[in-house]
Structures are given as C-alpha cells and as structure tokens.
Image: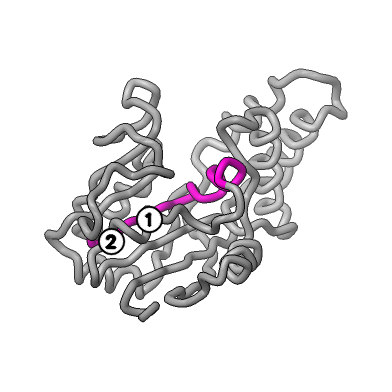
Amino acid sequence: MSFSPLPAIFLEDLALIAGRPALEAGCGDGRFSALLAARGARPWRLDRRPPWRGSVADVVADARDLPLADGSIALLVCANLLRHLWSARGPEAVPEGWRRCLAPDGCLWIFEDEPVSSPPAARNYREAMTLLARLDPEGRRPLLSLGGFLARLDDAGLREGWRHGMAVNESRVEDPEALARLLAGRGGGPEAPGVRLAAAIRRDGISYGPFWWARWSREAAA
C-alpha cells in the first residue's frame, strides 16, 4: 500500500508542519505512517479497528466523523481510504469534517491507487482489489479513479483549492504468493475467479502500478 516516490509538494508540506499536529486517517497496519515517520513527521494514527485486530491506531474512531476540534491539525493524510467510504457517504466527494479540522494554513492529502488494465502485473493487482471488495462488500471497495474523484468534486461544486497528480508506485507488493494462495483458497474449479487470478499472479506477477494524489488547502481555495 505504500506510495513511493512521494510527491515533492507533499514532502514540502511535511517539512513545513514539522512539530505540529498531524493525523493519518484509516492507518491500518501503519505502513504509510512509517513513510511519514521516515520523513520526520509524527502523526497520530486513526482507524475504526482496535489495535488487536491488526491496526496500529492511536485513536479508534470512524474517519467519516473525526473526533477533532475545528482548525486543530496542520496535516490530514488519507491513503487508500476514500474509496472505502464512498458507498456509505452518498454524493459528497470527501467528508466535510476533513476540511473543517484543518488549521488555516493546513492541508488535506488523499492518495489512491489508480485503476488500470495494463501492464499485466498492475492489472492483476486491480483485479485482486475488485475481487476482495466483492467478497467483503461491507468493508472494502474497488479502486477509485482520479477522474471519478474529480467528477464528483465538479458535481458538488467543490473543485476550488485542489491540486492533483499521478505517479507510478515503486514499492513492491509484499508476499504475492500469500495473496495468490488466499485468492485460490476461496474455492471453486479452475475457472473460478480467485483460482484464475492466482494463476495470473504466479505467471505475470503483481505490482501496485500508478497512484494518484489530491491536495486541498484553505489558502488555495480562498
């Protein structure tokens, strides 16, 4: 899930907020938090799952309703989180509280893997995320495209203050064989989706491929 290389503008923001409150929402197992820490940040980690279920959260809460005072943090980061919230949130592009909690000079960062159909290794990752979302519709959602996100911003009249871009993730998927075994173990014959995808992963490999980022600040929206 790690996003590397991090955008230059994001690294500039990290340098500017050194020593000030920051939060990663939907921290999961903490891999992205580790990237932030390696760059000198000390973010609080929030997740809806308690630590004993695999999360490393400092705060257990719903990311759609952050327990934060208005203007209380300098940086809010959401990595591969937004897509899991869309089905439950209706038409809004991002929860209103994500902007409300930012300090006047603070910024919101969203990172998401971009859906693609090539090369085969990246397509395998996308298909794996889609299949896992189908198997766990209450907890997971398929990948979210930058175009889909921007379209919803336009529909809501909230395009002001945003910058965005795309890069290719150089991080490697950890233990692809374990993922292949998980998918194949869902049952069915050789033509079952999980079995076919496991075979494709073993044949062509698996990679994160491209990711997109979007940055919002109150200053840019003014």
Residue depicted at 40% across the width and 37% down the height: 62
Observer able to see residue 108: yes
Residue 1: percent from the left, percent from the top? Answer: 48, 47
The amino acid marked with disc number 1 is Trp
Residue depicted at 71% across the width and 52% down the height: 123
Residues tagged 1 and 2 counted as in contact (Cβ below 8 A): yes
Residue 185: percent from the left, percent from the top? Answer: 69, 20
Residue 96: percent from the left, percent from the top? Answer: 42, 56
- Residue tagged 2: 102
Observer able to see residue 205: no
Nearer to us in this view, 211 or 17: 17
Q: How is the image coloured?
A: one colour
Q: Mark 1 and mark 2: span between their CA atoms?
A: 7 Å
Side of 200 where 176 appears, left or right:
left
Q: Quadrant of the C terminus?
A: bottom left
Q: What span is in magenta? A: 74-89
- Residue tagged 1: 98
Nearer to us in this view, 48 or 190: 48
